Amino acid sequence: MTQSTEYQPPKVWSAPQESNGRFSNINRPEAGARFEADLPRGKHVLQLYSLATPNGQKVTIMLEELLAAGVMEAEYDAHLIRIMDQEQFSSGFVAINPNSKIPALIDYSAATPQRVFESGAILLYLADKFGHFLPSDFAGRTEALNWLFWLQGSAPFVGGGFGHFYAYAPFKQEYPINRYTMETKRLLDVLDQRLAQAPYLAGDEYSIADMASWPWFGGLMNNTVYGAAEFLNAESYTHVRRWVDEISARPAVQRGIIVNSVTGEPEHQLHSRHQAADIDAVLEARRKAAE
């Protein structure tokens, strides 16, 4: 693909016939199922269909935090959805999430199963269902939701904006990289200023707002998404660094980010999770590899 100096939009847009972008075989302007396939189902009432991207990790962190808090009703099965293989466009998945994005959850605890899609909605659903990680007082709950929805609105600028043009676009372009780098750094500064005022986003309590935000901004700070920490001068955000490190040290977070992982050595991955022992085995393999 060659880069022209200026793009002239046509009167009516149509999808390009050829593209060598990383996601060109996935993206289409139409919604809906592309093939018929049922989803697997495990033994627990909570069935998660996901991948260990930042959006997927939000939910597995929440589920592992609930289990660590003693909420055994939060036991779950997590099934891998390989988005590069377009598994999110199966008829089974689209029935849960018509937007064809991971993660998606089905709760079979009621007579009529409840589907929940969009990562922020899943976090809120689980917090309300089990009564954890969301302040019970109205003011505290509102502050937590302020930051939850801040992240939900901000993540596309970091991922589809900065991440795409910096790391995935078929060629580098100064204008979109500058545009989304500026916005990503502004968001980091918003986060840094907030965390200068309080240990967590909602205040003194660790909440779903932190679980939603940490995979994205922790990924930037720790160079696990896009490899851009130096480019962003990430270490200048000292309060974000403190927050990232503290949350990284939580055992439930370390467990949650493993679920539905497909990168690294095969024994360090965990495609599907059906019981706590599945994560234990991966943690032990990683421990032995580090010795």
Image (cartoon, rainbow, N blue to C red):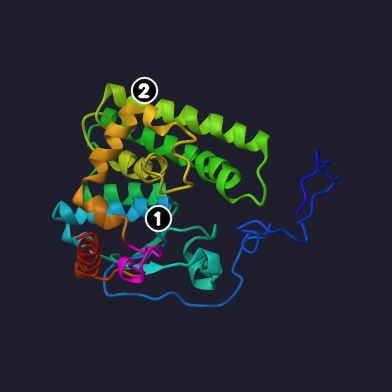
Is 97 placed left or right of 253 in the picture? right
Foreground: 48 or 57? 57
Image height check: is 67 above or below 87?
above
Amino acid at circle 1: Gly
- Disc 2 packing (10 Å; few <14; some 14–19; many ≥20): some
For residue 65, say whether it is visible: no
Among numbered discs 1 and 2, the one appearing first in the sequence: 1
Quadrant of the image for the N terminus?
A: bottom right
Most extreme residue toward the right is 11
Image height check: is 195 above or below 251?
above
Rendering quarter of residue 291: bottom left
Expressed as whole percent of the image width and height from the top left, the position of residue 82 reads 48, 67
Rendering quarter of residue 8: top right
Give the residue drawn at x 30%, y 38%: 244
Residue designated by label 2: 193
Foreground: 274 or 41? 274
Most extreme residue toward the left is 70
Expressed as whole percent of the image width and height from the top left, the position of residue 60 reads 31, 56
Amino acid at circle 2: Gln
Image height check: is 271 above or below 234?
below
Q: Which residues are magenta?
A: 259-271
The verdict on residue 54 being magenta is no
Rendering quarter of residue 241: top left
Q: CA distance from mark 1 to mark 2?
A: 26 Å
Residue designated by label 1: 56
